[in-house]
Image (cartoon, grey):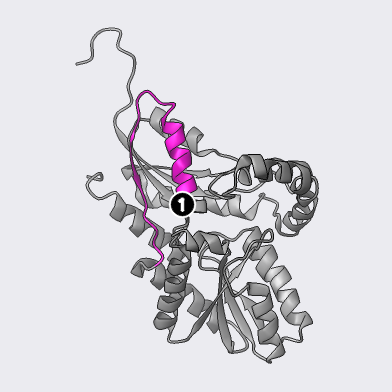
């Protein structure tokens, strides 16, 4: 029994926090600049001394890049907002419905809002003494998964009464993920009026030095593509997109690969297995610019296959992954 005058304490609950990268609040240069400043100041993303990097960022990148990026965002923006933000919110709503009273489900963005620390505090205020962090990155990378966990840890340093935390592991080779990918891909291929000569899996690029420093991301991407190919009985060609700066990046690059396939007279189905939700990098970079580069090189037969998003196969996978990680917490 609580002593007289004891403050109200919510009944103990379990929380699940879905985490994705984030996007600007509007497809305008000012909003993009604010978002890029936060994103490109993360030491996990740019592994250079701030003394060297910040003058470059503030003096050369932020004055120019936001206008170009805002133009790209305007091409994919919807009446509901940023596709990534809208889809992640739908994933959280779908998981909330699937879990029912078993857990309280929220979502957060590593950059922009809703912020990770803000959502952890909100879950704790609702009585969540145990929280599963679920970074929606199938392949582990220090610049994505570790950065999200860093942000959660930083938020915890400001809390007197901390919840217990678990983290959803990377699921790049998980049978649940591979089954969902294969089902989504096969459904999309069945709807095409051509049989693609090549299936290309495009992953977000990373500087080559991340591999040399021991980041497992490159290996995780390779294994995903290989296992997906085994599932569907076809070779899956890997590529890496979204290059930035002058450093050497993981190869092959997506757009030059698409051009070479077009020049060789090959038709293409393009997928993005490293993204849990469609976003700027998939909708604008792949489905708009990648398609245009392929077409301009004389290519015939191009299809972009959407991410798993908040659809049936993807949501079934997400629910089962989360329930597995909550084992021992759920009644």
Image position, residue 168 (x, y; %): 37, 52
Q: Locate the N terminus by quadrant.
A: top left
- Whether 189 is drawn above or below 19: the answer is below
Q: Is residue 273 visible?
A: yes
Residue reaching furthest to the bottom = 265
Residue 300 seen anywhere in this rendered image of the structure: no
Which of 258/206 is in front? 206
Question: Which residue sits at x=40%, y=80%?
Answer: 231
Q: How many marks?
A: 1
Query: Quarter-wise, where is residue 41 in the image?
Result: top right
In the image, farthest residue toward the left: 1
Q: Nearer the viewer, residue 321 or 140?
A: 140
Q: Position of residue 48 (x, y in %)?
A: 59, 47
In the image, is residue 154 above or below residue 78? above
Query: Which residue in the structure is indicated by mark 1?
Result: 145
User: Can you tell which quarter of the image residue 294 is in?
Assistant: bottom right
Find the residue positioned furthest to the top: 4
Residue 278 painted magenta: no
Specify the quadrant that holds the C terminus: top left
Residue 151 on the magenta segment: yes
Location of residue 246 with respect to 256 vertically, above or below: above
Q: Quick check: 82 left or right of 69? A: left
Say which of 222 and 86 sits in front: 222
Helix or strand or loop: what does disc 1 sit on?
helix
Mark 1 closeness class: few <14, some 14–19, many ≥20 residues within 10 Å: many
x, y percent for residue 129: 32, 33
Percent of width and height locating residue 260: 68, 84
Q: Residue at x 45, y 49 (%)?
A: 146
Left or right, residue 180 beside residue 114: left
> Which region shows up in magenta?
145-172
Residue at x 58%, y 61% (from the top left corner):
207
Q: Residue at x 55, y 59 (%)?
A: 277
């Amino acid at each position: 029994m609580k002593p007289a005058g004891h403050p109200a304490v919510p009944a103990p609950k379990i929380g699940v926090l879905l985490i994705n990268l984030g996007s600007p609040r509007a497809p305008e240069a000012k909003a993009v600049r604010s978002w890029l400043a936060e994103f490109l100041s993360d030491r996990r993303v740019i592994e250079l001394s701030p003394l060297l990097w910040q003058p470059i960022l503030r003096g050369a990148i932020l004055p120019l890049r936001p206008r170009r990026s805002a133009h790209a965002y305007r091409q994919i923006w919807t009446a509901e907002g940023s596709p990534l933000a809208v889809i992640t919110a739908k994933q959280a709503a779908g998981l909330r419905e699937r879990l029912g009273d078993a857990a309280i489900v929220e979502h957060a963005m590593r950059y922009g809002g809703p912020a990770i620390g803000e959502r952890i505090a909100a879950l704790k205020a609702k009585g969540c003494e145990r929280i599963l962090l679920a970074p929606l990155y199938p392949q582990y990378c220090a610049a994505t998964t570790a950065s999200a966990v860093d942000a959660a840890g930083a938020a915890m340093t400001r809390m007197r009464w901390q919840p217990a935390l678990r983290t959803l592991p990377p699921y790049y080779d998980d049978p649940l993920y591979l089954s969902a990918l294969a089902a989504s891909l096969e459904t999309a291929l069945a709807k095409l009026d051509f049989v693609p000569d090549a299936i290309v899996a495009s992953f977000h690029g990373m500087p080559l030095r991340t591999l040399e420093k021991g980041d497992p991301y490159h290996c995780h991407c390779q294994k995903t593509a290989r296992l997906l190919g085994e599932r569907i009985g076809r070779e899956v060609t890997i590529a890496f997109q979204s290059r930035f700066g002058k450093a050497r990046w993981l190869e092959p690059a997506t757009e030059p690969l698409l051009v070479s396939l077009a020049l060789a007279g090959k038709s293409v189905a393009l997928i993005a297995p490293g993204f849990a939700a469609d976003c700027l990098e998939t909708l604008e970079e792949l489905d708009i610019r990648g398609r245009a580069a392929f077409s301009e090189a004389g290519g015939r037969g191009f299809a972009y296959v959407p991410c798993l998003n908040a659809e049936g196969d993807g949501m079934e996978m997400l629910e089962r992954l989360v329930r597995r990680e909550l084992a021992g917490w759920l009644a």
